[in-house]
Amino acid sequence: MRFMVLMIPGVYQKGKKVDPNFVPPAEAMERMGKFNDELAKACPIISLNGLHPLTTGARITFAGGKAKVTDGASVEAKEVLGGYWMLQAKSKEEVVEWMKRCPAEQDDVIEIRQVFEMPEEP
């Protein structure tokens, strides 16, 4: 089974002043790198990446049959993804146990979702 694991940094949680240029400190990145190395020994990692700051992205919203694009620094968000892992694992429980070891910061949130796999066509 494949799982998408999403990191929502605490600095982007609602009620906090958002720094749109937030980049984790080098020490935090080093701890995360070590965690990822250990994780890779237990679960095949299909992909993993941190994401650039909010100011470099865009958000598209849909209303009334139209798409509205809001660029980087203008985006107002209560929760912003900081990075992700795409993992191959035997079960959700296996992923949960690994993610409980993640060197997350205060108020960070990790969301785990199983990937919906379309049946192969005959």
Image (cartoon, rainbow, N blue to C red):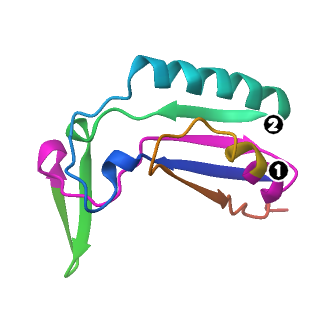
Q: Is residue 72 magenta?
A: yes
**Which amino acid type corresponds to the residue marked 1 in the rendered image?**
Glu
Q: Mark 1 touching mark 2, by CB under 8 A?
A: yes
Q: Nearer the viewer, residue 117 or 81?
A: 81
Foreground residue, 23 or 63?
Answer: 23
Q: Identify which residue is drawn at 81% across, 57% down.
A: 93
Q: Secondary structure at mark 2?
A: loop
State the residue in front, 24 or 48. Answer: 24
Q: Looking at the image, is mark 1 or mark 2 earlier in the sequence?
A: 2
Label 2: which residue? 43
Q: On the rendered structure, is 27 left or right of 121?
A: left
Q: CA distance from mark 1 to mark 2?
A: 9 Å
Q: Disc 1 designates what residue?
A: 94
Looking at the image, the residue that sits furthest to the bottom is: 64
At which x and y percent is residue 29?
49, 23
The residue range painted magenta reads 70-96
Three-letter code for the amino acid on which mark 2 is drawn: Cys
Q: Secondary structure at mark 1?
A: helix
Q: Is residue 29 above or below residue 14?
A: above
Q: What residue is drawn where x is 21% and y is 40%?
A: 20
88 displayed left or right of 102: right
The 10 Å Cα crowd at callout 2, few under 14, some 14 to 19, many 20 or more, is some
Q: Residue furthest left?
A: 74
Q: Is residue 23 left or right of residue 120?
A: left
